[in-house]
Image (cartoon, rainbow, N blue to C red):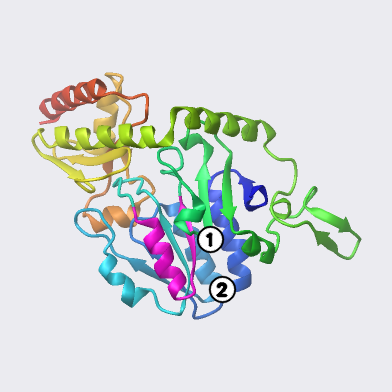
Amino acid sequence: SANEIVFTRGTTESINLVAQAWGEKFIREGDVILLTEMEHHSNLVPWQLLAKRTGARLRFVGVCDDGTLDLEQLPSLLTPEVKLFAFTHISNSLGTINPVAELCEKAHAVGALTLVDAAQSAGHLPIDVQELGCDFLAFSGHKMCGPTGIGALYGRGEILDSMPPWHGGGEMIVSVTLEKSAFKKAPHRFEAGTPNIAGAIGLAAAIQYIEQIGRPAIFEHDSHLARYAAERLTELPGMRVFGPTEERGALVGFVMDAAHPHDLTTFADQYGLALRGGHHCNQPLMRRFGVSGTTRASFYFYNTTEEIDRMIEILDAAVRFFS
């Protein structure tokens, strides 16, 4: 329902809201927060800070060589001490699509809540929080044709109402005296101050636009492009492609032996090719694969296979240039 949607500045703020409001109330010393090795720093650092404040412990689901989660580890990791399992829907570096419904079901079986980082998935595939079974889900507007600085947190109503406010100010109160305040129910208790009105309107327009195109069609198109790009990249010498070979999200990460990712992206920019190079806020994941960073190509419904062919031509020229 609308009462289960909290407007935030984006995925990062949404996760921090949960870590501070829910975490400070319900996490105690000795409790466990389960994460994965593929998390964006935004779904890692807030939990590190919470663990430091509360004495909780962090555990991590490992990543296999093919970029998928090592699900065989779950029985030993998902124990009754786990109070929250927070994980990404789609890896922003590998393109791995995690089995959210399965992970949520396994977490609930031991009494843990779940938080899904949907920054990479909200604009690319159909999402139904009831079908997924998650307790929290966070996403950002700028990842789905919307403005920057706007996003949202979904939280199950009874959980949101059990959480204290995390910011104080106007519009989130019922009454105020000099000594104390009474607060509104969710979502308003988490939306202190003047909201990003223009951002919310822009986000709504973006969502309507995406819905008109159709998320299933977007997912099919994007996945085809990502698989095609991954296949074409392997044709180039000295190229290492990361992530699953079958189904993947709308991106592909790779390393070229001949050039550092930063040099490669600078070279590509000279030809009008927009790539991103670096650790992608995934430093632990980069260490897991023994690299300092990767180059990432991201795709959306407006991209074409012809553009990928052009990308391969430019990268082939880069191989010759840097070799």
Residue 27 disc label: 2
Left or right: residue 166 compared with residue 54: right
Q: Is 123 drawn above or below residue 11 in the view shown?
A: above
Q: Can residue 240 be seen in this view?
A: yes
Dot 2 crowding, Cα within 10 Å, few <14, some 14–19, many 20+: many
The disc labelled 2 sits on which kind of residue? Ile
Pointer 1 with pointer 2, Cβ within 8 A? no
Q: What element carries label 1?
A: loop
Identify which residue is drawn at 49% across, 77% down.
31
Left or right: residue 135 compared with residue 104: right
- In the orientation shown, which residue stands out farthest toward the front? 131
Can you give x and y, in whole percent of width and height, for residue 295 in the image?
27, 38
Left or right: residue 27 compared with residue 96: right
- Over which residues does the magenta segment extend? 98-117
Can you give x and y, in whole percent of width and height, for residue 15 in the image?
53, 55
Along the line of sight, which residue is nearer the eye, 54 or 227?
A: 227
Identify which residue is drawn at 45% across, 55% down.
132
Residue 135 disc label: 1
